[in-house]
Image (spheres, helix red, strand yellow):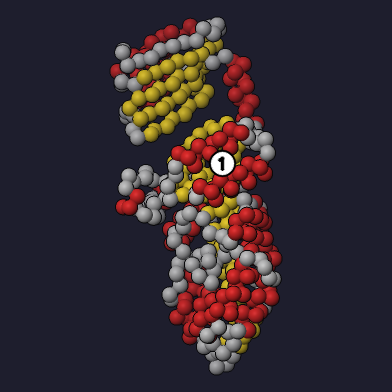
Amino acid sequence: MSDTKFSISDTKITKRELILMNIAGPDRPGLTAALTDILARHDARILDIGQADIHHTLALGILFQTDSLKSGEILKELLFTTSDMHVQVQFSIVPENEYDKWVGMQGKNRYIITILGRTLTAEQISHVTRIIAEQQLNIDNIRRLTGRMPLDDAKQPMAKACIELSVRGNPADRMSMQKDFMELAANLNFDISLQEDNMYRRSRRLICFDMDSTLIRTEVIDELAEHAGVGQEVRSITESAMRGEIDFKESFRKRVALLKGLDISVMKQIAESLPITEGVERLMKVLKRSGYKTAIISGGFTYFGNYLRQKFGFDYVYANELEIDPDGKLTGRYIGDIVDGQRKKDLLRLLAQVENIDIAQTIAVGDGANDLPMLSEAGLGIAFHAKPKVKASASQSISTIGIDGVLYFLGFKDSYMTQHPTEPCPEN
């Protein structure tokens, strides 16, 4: 039994013993079954169990309760079994007062911290975990959500890396923690999300997207303006509006007026050549398979929103309707209310009511200043490749990868996303 380490603390033995068993070594099929079978035969009660596997190396912990008269025989059998399976075992007795204190921790809040990027470095993880420690939080669990990273980045240039940390406790200053995370992510080129792990995080059901510069890598009104010969003029107004420098409604009226006389055949041409954002197809497949309702709430135009709806299967589209004259030309006017920031927020709330869900079960994704009301209203608001003002105001942001990065903020693993469509999706 040279591979086995055995140590028992000098804690006074009582009739009822709590014993923590830690196993380390190569992962072997049947190990957990063999160990728990021994505990079962001796009527031991398992109080806690956890396992991790990193590159075929196992770390297994089992906390069990037994009668002190049986513990010697149990430990002997466990020692022989672990020796035969060439893994190391270490035992320690846990005082009941320590166990009671640990049970009491269940009342504390739990937070999920998601770290995301093309690659993740030791420096990034080190800074994040230092902030966690400074906030007096304990890390309960770390899991990798993405597949294993290739050694040669050049072979997989669009790779993603994501880990999720589960932490327990009450932050000393949550606002400060959030601010530190966002600043760190901006400085070290990665994305991070801090969410309270409550019932709403596990039951989100509606996700609303901005369209222009979010689902597509362009502003459609700018594309229309190019065909109308007023591209530079419209672009400057658009950029000013997205930065929050001028009122969205005012900018919208000015830009639409400049499109007067444009033939509507141009709209079909633009729609068929829209540059789709990286990850949209993957994102929508997973969301639809998982039962999410999806919506486009856009300050753009319904024609293009409906095109994306048909292509990817969105459930709802709300955008602006351009007025067309009998000759098939744009009049330079619009029909109905302008979908500005306030309207986006109102539509988010309306859809939550239609779907009969709490607003905390909603998600919103956008990039511009007119998306801020919607992002702040949703249970989870995500700034996606956003303008500086938007990113500075958002609690979560994605700037390093495609829009399917949203799935990792929802707790999905790559293994969930590659299942056959007929298979049930595991709980995220």
Residue at figure coordinates x 57%, y 69% from the top left = 317
Query: What x and y, as percent, mark residue 334?
Result: 64, 81
Left or right, residue 305 beside residue 420: right
Total labels drawn: 1
57 or 116: nearer the viewer = 116
Please report the residue visible at 50 percent of the width from the left and 45 percent of the height from the top: 115
Q: Position of residue 346 (x, y in %)?
A: 69, 64
Examine the rendering and report whether any part of residue 6 can be seen: yes
Residue 191 location (% of width, % of height): 52, 49
Q: Secondary structure at mark 1?
A: strand
Dot 1, crowdedness within 10 Å: few (<14), some or many (≥20)?
many
Q: Quadrant of the N terminus?
A: top left
Indicate the quadrant where residue 52 lies: top left
Tag 1: amino acid: Ile
In this view, the residue in front, 290 or 144, is 144
Q: Residue drawn 35% across and 30% down?
A: 57
Taking the spot 49% from the left edge, 67% from the top edge, the residue there is 216
Q: Residue furthest bottom?
A: 327
Q: Nearer the viewer, residue 387 or 332?
A: 387
Q: Position of residue 342 (x, y in %)?
A: 69, 65
- Relative to 419, say whether 106 is above or below: above
Disc 1 designates what residue? 112
Relative vertical location of residue 4 with respect to residue 232 in this rendering, above or below? above
Residue 15 is at least partly visible in this image: no
